[in-house]
Image: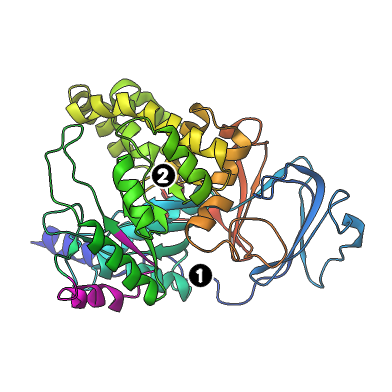
């Protein structure tokens, strides 16, 4: 009996305790990063011996001998924290434009989230900050879960990357996603209003007939209905993204007015006419290579989970289960086998798009971990994209995907101060993007030792 009471008390303490300390409420002191090699996310190339000044949440000055404002002309604001950047490399905060954050439940669930859900969500969010990811877009989740975390992030009630979210997905009855099922217009417009009531940052539309890989056929939205849905969200000031997997559906969605593609074409190599169309249209396309490749990688190379970034952010028991039970299961999984064949096709499709438009491809993982963002970078480079372009893809292009390029994605005067200080050059070796010394979000240095990740819980 005493044991049961003790366990009950312990459970109450675990659930009732705050999931983390509140974010810093007072304005941060100005920051001055001096002597750093600047990789500003614009694709202009590295700038040696640069100085970046941050005041409040914004970058207020950027200077170097090769930039319009010489370094010597940049005066440190009173009380500024001076960061010695000599021998180091500064990049914009990384951005993942396609996550499904762990902790959410059924997308139709409108109940308030539980303490356990919030704890799981915050821990997942902290893996992103730990890995240098300062902004994420959740592309489908339980609305009450992801919007609740988004709102707490925006009021500094939790330490978190910047969160944009869609909540549930709009699709046809029996289609890909849900729970906002649209069949007729204007009769079903009220369903879209239900979705809009949650104040989504973007609408995610599910448009996939399946019938490829190991998936049976399902229904999808008629093209004229798709256009009406996109127009309706545009009339409310909401951008759109769409789940597609083949070239035909991508083209129809683009000409229906969609703003972004949530995935690249993966069912086949893209045609020359598609490449030419994208050269003109330049529709931002999330890369999402990691989700498909993760199955065969686990089957063939489970030792990847021994890398520091995975060990620091995944429970040891989960790693062991993945390396044994799940690895064995994936060796005979038909979907894993199919994706092993098609991932190189998607990699080449993305390279061809990047070759004709350096602003098209945007970094997305379709996962829920900061470590996966770095795998996405590796896969982009493995497909023939240069490390320098991969950094742009995960910063400037990702901000463009979100419609936030005026605020995020590059290290330029006036932009939000989301920065990552590295100890090695990621444009030489993309794995150097993991060599993180400091993460700054909204002008505040994130104490990585206090994030709720496995590495810190072991201390």
The residue where tag 1 is placed is 23
- Image coordinates for residue 442, horizontal then vertical, percent: 59, 66
Q: Is residue 56 left or right of residue 250?
A: right
Magenta segment range?
A: 185-204
| Label 1 element class | loop
For the image, the number of numbered tags is 2
Image position of 70 with respect to 186: above or below = above
User: Is 95 included in the stretch rendered in magenta?
Assistant: no
Closer-to-camera residue (356/322):
356
Crowding at mark 2 (Cα within 10 Å: few <14, some 14-19, many 20+):
many
Mark 2: secondary structure: helix
Q: Position of residue 366 (x, y in %)?
A: 35, 46
Q: Nearer the viewer, residue 7 or 99?
A: 99
Residue at 70% x, 60% y: name it. 412
Between disc 2 and disc 1, whose residue precedes? 1
Return the residue found at the far right.
Answer: 72
Which residue does the image show at 29% across and 47% down from the upper left? 249
Q: Residue at x 67, y 68 (%)?
A: 58
Write down the quadrant of residue 184 in the picture.
bottom left
- In this picture, is 214 found above or below 365? above
Q: Residues within 10 Å of mark 1 (few under 14, many from 20)?
A: some
* Coordinates of residue 7 in the picture (x, y in percent): 18, 60
Numbered label attached to residue 313: 2
Residue 362 seen anywhere in this rendered image of the structure: no
């Amino acid at each position: 009996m005493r044991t049961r009471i003790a366990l009950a008390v312990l459970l109450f303490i675990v659930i009732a305790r705050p999931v983390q300390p509140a974010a810093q409420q007072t304005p941060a002191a100005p920051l001055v990063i001096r002597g750093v090699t600047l990789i500003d996310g614009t694709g202009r190339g590295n700038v040696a011996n640069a100085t970046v000044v941050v005041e409040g949440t914004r970058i207020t000055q950027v200077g170097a001998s090769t930039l319009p404002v010489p370094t010597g002309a940049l005066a440190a604001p009173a009380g500024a924290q001076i960061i010695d950047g000599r021998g180091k490399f500064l990049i914009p905060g990384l951005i993942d434009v396609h996550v499904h954050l762990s902790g959410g439940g059924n997308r139709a669930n409108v109940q308030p989230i539980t303490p356990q859900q919030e704890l799981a969500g915050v821990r997942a969010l902290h893996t992103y900050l730990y890995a240098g990811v300062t902004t994420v877009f959740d592309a489908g989740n339980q609305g009450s879960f992801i919007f609740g975390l988004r709102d707490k992030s925006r009021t500094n009630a939790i330490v978190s990357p910047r969160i944009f979210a869609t909540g549930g997905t709009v699709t046809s009855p029996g289609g890909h996603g849900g729970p906002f099922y649209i069949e007729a217009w204007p009769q079903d417009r009220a369903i879209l209003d239900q979705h809009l009531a949650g104040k989504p940052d973007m609408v995610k539309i599910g448009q996939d007939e399946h019938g490829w890989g190991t998936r049976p056929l399902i229904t999808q939205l008629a093209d004229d209905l798709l256009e009406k849905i996109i127009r309706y969200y545009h009339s409310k000031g909401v951008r759109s993204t769409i789940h597609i997997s083949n070239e035909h559906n991508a083209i129809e969605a683009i000409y229906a007015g969609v703003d972004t593609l949530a995935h690249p074409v993966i069912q086949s190599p893209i045609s020359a006419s598609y490449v030419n169309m994208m050269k003109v249209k330049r529709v931002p396309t999330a890369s999402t290579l990691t989700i498909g490749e993760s199955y065969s990688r686990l089957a063939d190379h489970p030792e990847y989970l021994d890398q520091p970034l995975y060990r620091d952010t995944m429970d040891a028991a989960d790693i062991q289960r993945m390396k044994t039970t799940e690895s064995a299961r994936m060796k005979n999984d038909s979907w894993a086998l199919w994706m092993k064949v098609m991932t190189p096709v998607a990699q080449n499709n993305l390279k061809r798009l990047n070759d004709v438009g350096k602003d098209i491809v945007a970094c997305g993982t379709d996962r829920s971990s900061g470590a996966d963002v770095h795998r996405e970078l590796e896969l982009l480079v493995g497909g023939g994209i240069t490390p320098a372009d991969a950094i742009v893809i995960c910063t400037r292009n990702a901000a463009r995907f979100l419609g936030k390029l005026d605020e995020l994605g590059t290290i330029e005067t006036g932009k939000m101060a989301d920065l990552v200080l590295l100890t090695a050059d990621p444009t030489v070796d993309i794995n150097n993007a993991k060599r993180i010394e400091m993460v700054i979000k909204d002008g505040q240095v994130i104490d990585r030792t206090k994030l709720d990740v496995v590495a810190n819980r072991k201390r």
